[in-house]
Image (cartoon, grey):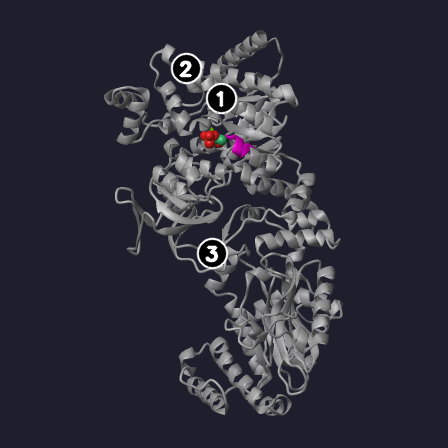
Amino acid sequence: MQQDDPIITLVTETAPIKTETHGGRAKCLQRLVRLSLPVPLTVALSFRAVHDIAEGRMPDIRALLKPFGAHPLLCVRPSSEDPDWGGPSAVLNIGMNDAMHAALSERIGIEAATRLYGRFVRTYAIHVERLDPDVFDDLPMSGPAALEGALAAYQDETDEPFPQDAAVQLAAVLKSMARAWRGTTARLLRQAKGAPADAGLGLVVQEMALGLGKGGVCGSGVIQLVSSGTGRLRITGRYMNQSQGREALQDSGEGALYLARDARGPSLQDLAPEAFEQLVEYCGLMRFRLREEMQAEFTIENGQVHVLDALRAQRSSRAAVRIAVALAEDGVIPRDEALCRVDPRALNEMLHRQVDPMAPRDVIGKGIAASPGAASGKLVFSALAAQACHARDEPCILARRETGPEDIRGMHAAVAVITERGGITSHAAVIGRGLGLPCAVGVTGLIFDMKEQLLRTRDGRVFRAGDIVTVDGTNGDILAGEAPLHEAAQDDAFQAMMTWAEEYCDIGIRANADTPADAEVARRFNAQGIGLCRTEHMFFDPGRLTVMREMIFAREGADRAAALERLLPMQRADFIKLFNIMQGRPVCIRLFDPPLHEFLPADRAGMRELAEALSMPLSDVTRRVEALSEYNPMLGMRGVRLGITMPEIYDMQARAIFEATLEASRNGAPVVPEIMIPLVSAKREVEMVKKRIDAVAAAVKMETGRDFTYRLGVMVETPRAALRAGEIAPHAAFLSFGTNDLTQMTYGLSRDDAGKFMSEYVKQGVYREDPFHTLDTEGVGELLMIGAERGRAARPDLTLSICGEHGGNAESIAFCRDVGFDYVSCSPFRVPVARLAAAQLRIRPTLPPRALKTS
Ligand code: PEP
Ligand code: MG
C-alpha cells in the first residue's frame, strides 16, 4: 500500500483523504490525527476501492495489512459521505485466531481472550459468512465450551475450519461490508435520509485498542460535553470496565459508569481522574478545532486513553439551536454559520410541545400534519362536550368529521383537534395553526362514528368519548393513551437565533392574524406586520356568528342594513385592537370572503338553534339554507362576488377600518391600513369595489374632519387574476397571492377533499409533494411569475407578497425570494420558521457545503 495512495491510504496528517472520496468518518479521523489525538493506526479505503471490492476486484490485502505488523488485530467501520446515511455495522477483532487467542490469554487473561474469540467467530459467521444465527442458539454463551462449540458449528455449516489467516478474514469482512451497502434495504434507508442513489461507501481499517487487560484501568466508552436533549453543557456518556465498542451503552447498562462524578453511582472521574481529564480536554479541542460538538468513542488500555472515532453529537432540535448559538457566542463559528446549522422546520419542535421521540408510540391513526405540537386528552365528539371538559379543567381532544364556525368555541376549549376529512388548508387546519393548536386532518386508519361517539381502529380497537388519546400534530399521528411530552422551549438560545436571523433576512415576514390573540403572537415573534387578516374569522365566535348569519340570511336590504349596523362596532373594535397591538406596523385586512357553507348550520339542531336566534320558523330557516346552498361553495358566492352583489357589506367593513384607523392613530403612530379584495378574477370587480371604498373614505374624512391614507390591494387567487395582473395592477397598490385557492384552482383540486387521496398520489410519485403544502413552483409558480411580471410592468412600485399557507414553507419562500416578492405572510407560529429559512437563503451561497456535518 502506498502511503499517499488516494484509493487506499494510511490516515496521516497529509494523506489525500476527502469526505467526498473517503467518507466522513475517514476525514474526521484524519482531523483527529492532525490534532495529535491518540488515534490507533488507521487505513482508509476510498469509495472507489470499496466499489471495486463489491465487484470482486480485491486490493492487495497483504499490502493493506503491512502497517499493522505480523499479528494484527483490527476493526473495520463504514465511512459514508454523510454519517447520517449509516452503513453496515462495524466488525471488531479481525485477526482473532488460535495464535492470537494464546497470545491474548497471556496479556488479558484466558477468560477474556476466550470470550473475545468466541464472540468474533459468531460475528464472522453471521455477518460475514451469512450463516443462520440459529446455528449458535444452543451453545453456552461463555467459557471454553462456548468457543469450542462456535468453532465446531462454523465448521459443520461451512465444511471448512474457521479461517486462521488475518488476510482471509479481512478480505471477507471487506467484501461483505461492501456488498451490504448495495442491498436494497440499505439503499432505501439512506435515500430516505437524502442520500443520492449512487452514494459511495468508504471503509476504515483500524488497529484495535483493547479495552481489556490485567494491568491498570481497562475499558471503553463514549463521551460528549453537552446533553443531547437540551444542548446544555453537561459531560455525558458511559464507560464500562473490560469492554469494547459501545458495550457501555447497551440497554441493560449493567456495570456501566457515569463519566463525571455523579450522585447516582460510580464514575470514571473517580476511577481514573487523569484519563477523564484527558478525555474532557480532547473533546474541548475537537469542539474548537472541528467547530462542532462531537461524541468521541474511546478505550482506556492500562490507563492509556485512545480515541477510536468521533461523530457529530446527536441532538434534539432544541439542543441543535443551543449548540449552534453557544458555538457562535464562543467565537468558534460565525453567526451566519450558526444560523445554517439548524433546520428551520425543527423550530416547530421548540415552539410547541412534542411527543418524546424516544417514547414508544401506539399509533392508531394517521392524518395530515396540519398544525404542529402535541397534546393528550379525553376524546370528545362535539364542541359542546369540549367546552364542558374545559369547564371541568380536563384536557380534551375534539374529534369531528370536519370543523366549521360552530366548532370554534370547542376548538378553543380543546387541547388538540382531529378531523376525518380535510387537507392542509381546510377550516380545522387554518384555525388550528392560528391558535397554535395541534391538529391532524384527513385522518386515515380510524373510523369516526359520530353517532356512537367513538373511533374504531383498523385492528378493531374502539376508543370512546372519555378515552385518552394523544395527537401528534407535528407528524399527523393519533396515539392511544397519554404519551410523554417535551415542553416548548422558546428560551434564550432560541431568542438569540431569531435576533441573528432577523439581521440576515432580506424578505419581509408578516403573519396571518385574524384576532387580537393571533396578533399578540405575531408581535411576540416580531412579525413585520399582518399580511392577512381574514375578517370573516372574526365572526366565528358564537355570539357574533348569529349576527353574521342574520346578515347573510337577510332577504331585504333593510334587514341586511340592520345586521350590518350591529356588525360595524364589533369590526371597528376588532380593528382598533389589531392596530394597537401592531403599533404602526402594516395591517392588511381582507374584506369578507366567507364561502357561505362555512356559515350555514350543517344539521337540524343547528338550524333549530338559528331559527330560535332569528325568531324565524324552522321551515323558513330550512328553506333559506336550501336556497343559499351551493353545489360548489368554494367557487360560488364568495369573495368579491359577495362584495359586488351585496356592496353594503364591504361599505360597512371599509367604514369600520377607517374609523378604527382614526381612533388608533390618536395615541400611537399613524396607521396606514391595507385593504385587500379577495377572489378577484376581473379588472372590473376591482374598479367597482375601489370606487365604493374611496367613497366611504371620503365620507369618513368629511364626517370627522380628519385625514388618513390607506392602500387598496388585490388578492390574486384565481388563475385569471394572475394572467390579467397587467390590467389589475394600475388599480392596486399591492398584489398578494393567495396560493391556497390558487393551487386549488390551478390543479382543479378541492382543498377540502384532497386529503383523501393526497398521500396515495405522493406515494405513487404522481405529485412530488402535496401542492397545498409546498408550492408547486412549476404550475402555480408560473402563474405567480406571470402575475408578478405583468403587475410590475404595469406598476413598478407594486408591492408583491404571498399569504397562502406556503408563506411559511422554506422551499416556497426560496421561490418567492427569487421572484422578487417583498414579503411572505404565514401563520403566526410559523414566523420564526420562515425567518430562519429566509436568513439561510441569503447566507448559504457563501458557506462551505455542509462541511460540518462530516467533521
Ligand atoms: C388563499 O386562498 O391562499 C388564502 C390565503 O385565503 P383563504 O385560505 O382564506 O382562502
Ligand atoms: Mg383564498
Q: Position of residue 127 (x, y in %)?
A: 49, 75
Residue at which label 3 appears: 484
Residue lying farthest top? Answer: 702
* Amino acid beneath label 2: Met
Q: Position of residue 740 (x, y in %)?
A: 47, 33
Is residue 304 positioned above or below 291 on the image?
A: below
What's the distance in space between the residues labelled 1 and 3, CA to CA? 42 Å
Quadrant location of the N terminus?
Answer: bottom right
In the picture, the disc for residue 717 is none
Q: Badge 2 local density, few (<14 within 10 Å), some, or many (20+)?
A: some
* Amino acid beneath label 3: Pro
What's the distance in space between the residues labelled 2 and 1, CA to CA? 18 Å
Q: Nearer the viewer, mark 2 or mark 3?
A: 3
Q: Position of residue 643 (x, y in %)?
A: 44, 17
Q: Earlier in the sequence, mark 2 or mark 3?
A: 3
- Residue 277, located in which quarter of the rendered image? bottom right
Residue at which label 1 appears: 571
Q: Which residues are magenta?
A: 514-519
